[in-house]
């Protein structure tokens, strides 16, 4: 449940018009959005168990 909440929160931040750095700046504006998404992905990926990875890699 917490993994879904983390991903949904990161996606919500990505589409939110209120950011730490406004998206109107060409490249820098999306840097904080990408950082939040990457952080959320890293958190979720770090908690995936090896048995789950092995089970789904065979498919």
Image (tube, rainbow, N blue to C red):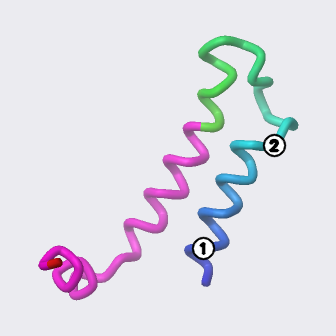
Most extreme residue toward the right is: 18
> x%, y% of residue 45?
39, 66
Q: Secondary structure at mark 1?
A: helix
Dominant secondary structure of the residues highlighted in magenta in the image: helix
- Pick the front one: 31 or 26: 26
Range covered by the magenta-colored residues: 34-58
> x%, y% of residue 12?
74, 53
Considering only vertical position in the picture, is 24 above or below 11? above
Quadrant of the drawing holding the N terminus: bottom right
Q: Secondary structure at mark 2?
A: loop
Most extreme residue toward the left is: 58
For the point 61% across and 46% down, which residue is it?
36
For the point 30% across and 82% down, which residue is it?
49
> x%, y% of residue 4?
60, 73
Q: Earlier in the sequence, mark 2 or mark 1?
A: 1
Disc 2 designates what residue? 16
Considering only vertical position in the picture, is 9 above or below 56? above
Residue 59 horizontal side relative to residue 36, left or right: left
Quadrant of the drawing holding the C terminus: bottom left
Whether residue 28 is in magenta: the answer is: no
Disc 1 designates what residue? 4
Residue 3 horizontal side relative to residue 16, left or right: left
Give the Cα separation between the discs numbered 2 and 1: 18 Å
Occupied quadrant, residue 40: bottom right
Whether residue 53 is in magenta: the answer is: yes
Disc marking residue 14: none
For the point 38% across and 68% down, which residue is it?
46
Most extreme residue toward the top is: 26
> x%, y% of residue 21?
76, 26
């Amino acid at each position: 449940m917490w993994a879904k909440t983390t991903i949904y929160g990161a996606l919500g931040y990505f589409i939110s018009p209120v950011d730490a750095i406004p998206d109107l700046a060409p490249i820098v504006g999306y840097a904080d959005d990408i950082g939040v998404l990457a952080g959320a992905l890293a958190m979720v990926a770090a908690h995936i168990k090896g048995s789950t990875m092995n089970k789904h890699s065979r498919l």
